[in-house]
Image (cartoon, rainbow, N blue to C red):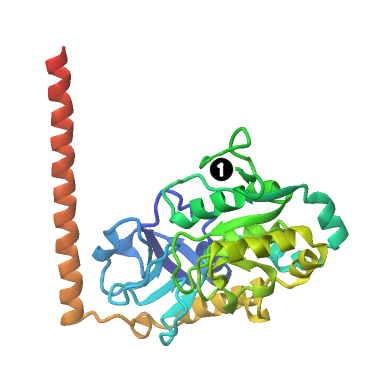
């Protein structure tokens, strides 16, 4: 069956050939990608406001890779990090499920013989980020751990190994520990960072999702939030660093707390959720309010975005005029 989809406000990284949802849809239907005015389904994210112009008949599906809660007045269905139930309208799909190869390594990390793991772990601890505009916990953990032993920074941020690494996974493979921090500490917001560390056989020194143990086994990581102080945290890090038995226990603990979160099971559940949406007649698949207050809500957002776009264009033209004026005065 042919299904007409539009993909908007997804940012410059969107490519239909590699986009995870497109791959799923191609398994379920004859996918036709078209513009929003001719589509029956509109998939959108946080990188624009054009989705507000979607025709009312369209089924709107929101997807975010950020720590943002879906606006169910703007969409019929949503995919996010939130640990929530909302009828058939929401599916929790963390970003790391889009990288099946890394997930596969993470799920089987405890099967590697400890003796072989120990041989490849020649370095103490890694951290790999490039944007320094992060939560202060990044800097705090880096500074505190660096007082004990050198922490290798493989990204552009505080790089101390001669330049950014080409492969984060390969870089982490030689390190016993890895600093893993989320940008925020929001329940359910768990990114690919901890998956990458576990896939490389590292012990994650983790800070972020307060409900991390719902998905990931608390016995395979050192959770910063479990400690009353950095001093108490460092006591445990040093004990594990100097006791191979403790290290082995952390390594041999499975990464996931429950089999329901395994890649294949989760992917299958997501696929069925999408199938449920597209198998219904369009009028029966509708969930958001399109009348009265629902219509007023959308119209108000359209006015707001148009006003914002106008102000941004005006500010841009003022900036360009200022630059031109300065240039000609200097001639």
Q: Indicate the position of residue 330 as horizontal and vertical percent values.
A: 16, 15
Along the line of sight, the residue nearer the viewer: 247 or 323: 247
How many numbered discs sit on the rendered protein?
A: 1
Tell me, yes or no, if residue 217 can be seen here. Answer: no
Q: Indicate the position of residue 262 as horizontal and vertical percent values.
A: 66, 74
Along the line of sight, the residue nearer the viewer: 171 or 27: 171
Q: Is residue 196 left or right of residue 313?
A: right
Q: Indicate the position of residue 17 as horizontal and vertical percent values.
A: 53, 54
> Residue at image x 30%, y 80%?
288
Q: In this view, does 210 lie above or below 10?
A: below
> Residue at image x 56%, y 39%?
159
Q: Is residue 225 above or below residue 286?
A: above
User: Image quadrant of residue 317?
Assistant: top left
How many other residues sit within 10 Å of disc 1, few (<14), some (14-19) or many (≥20)? many
Tell me, yes or no, if residue 236 can be seen here. Answer: yes
Under tag 1, what secondary structure?
loop
Along the line of sight, the residue nearer the viewer: 246 or 132: 246
Q: Indicate the position of residue 236 as horizontal and vertical percent values.
A: 67, 65
Along the line of sight, the residue nearer the viewer: 108 or 274: 108
Q: Which quarter of the rendered picture does the C terminus lie within?
A: top left
> Residue at image x 68%, y 80%?
259
Q: Is residue 169 above or below residue 164?
A: below
Q: Mark 1 points at which residue?
A: 155
Q: Is residue 240 left or right of residue 161?
A: right
> Residue at image x 62%, y 73%?
216
Q: In this view, does 109 lie to the left or right of 8?
A: right
């Amino acid at each position: 069956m042919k299904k007409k989809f539009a993909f908007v406000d997804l940012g410059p990284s969107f490519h239909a050939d590699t986009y995870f949802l497109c791959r799923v849809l191609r398994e379920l239907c004859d996918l036709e990608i078209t513009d929003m005015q001719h589509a029956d389904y509109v998939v959108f994210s946080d990188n624009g406001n054009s989705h507000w112009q979607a025709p009312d008949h369209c089924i709107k599906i929101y997807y975010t890779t950020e720590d943002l809660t879906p606006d169910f007045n703007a969409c019929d269905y949503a995919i996010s990090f939130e640990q929530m139930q909302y009828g058939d309208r929401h599916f929790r799909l963390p970003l790391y499920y889009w990288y099946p190869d890394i997930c596969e390594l993470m799920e089987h990390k405890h099967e590697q013989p400890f003796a072989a793991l120990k041989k490849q772990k020649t370095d103490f601890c890694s951290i790999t980020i490039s944007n320094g505009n992060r939560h202060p916990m990044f800097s705090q953990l880096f500074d505190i751990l660096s007082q004990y032993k050198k922490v290798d920074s493989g990204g552009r941020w505080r790089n101390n190994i001669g330049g950014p690494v080409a492969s984060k996974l390969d870089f982490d493979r030689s390190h016993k520990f890895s600093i893993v921090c989320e940008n925020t500490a929001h329940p359910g917001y768990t990114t690919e960072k901890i998956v990458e560390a576990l896939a490389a056989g590292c012990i994650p020194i983790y800070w972020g999702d307060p409900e991390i143990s719902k998905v990931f086994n608390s016995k395979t990581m050192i959770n910063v939030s479990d400690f009353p102080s950095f001093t108490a945290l460092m006591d445990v890090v040093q004990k594990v660093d100097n006791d191979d038995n403790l290290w082995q226990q952390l390594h041999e603990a499975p990464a996931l707390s429950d089999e329901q979160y395994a890649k294949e099971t989760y992917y299958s559940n997501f696929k069925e959720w999408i199938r449920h949406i597209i198998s219904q007649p369009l009028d029966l698949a509708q969930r958001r309010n399109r009348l009265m207050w629902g219509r007023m809500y959308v119209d108000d957002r359209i006015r707001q975005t148009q006003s914002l776009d106008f102000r941004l264009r005006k500010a841009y033209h003022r900036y360009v005029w200022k630059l031109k004026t300065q240039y000609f005065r200097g001639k």
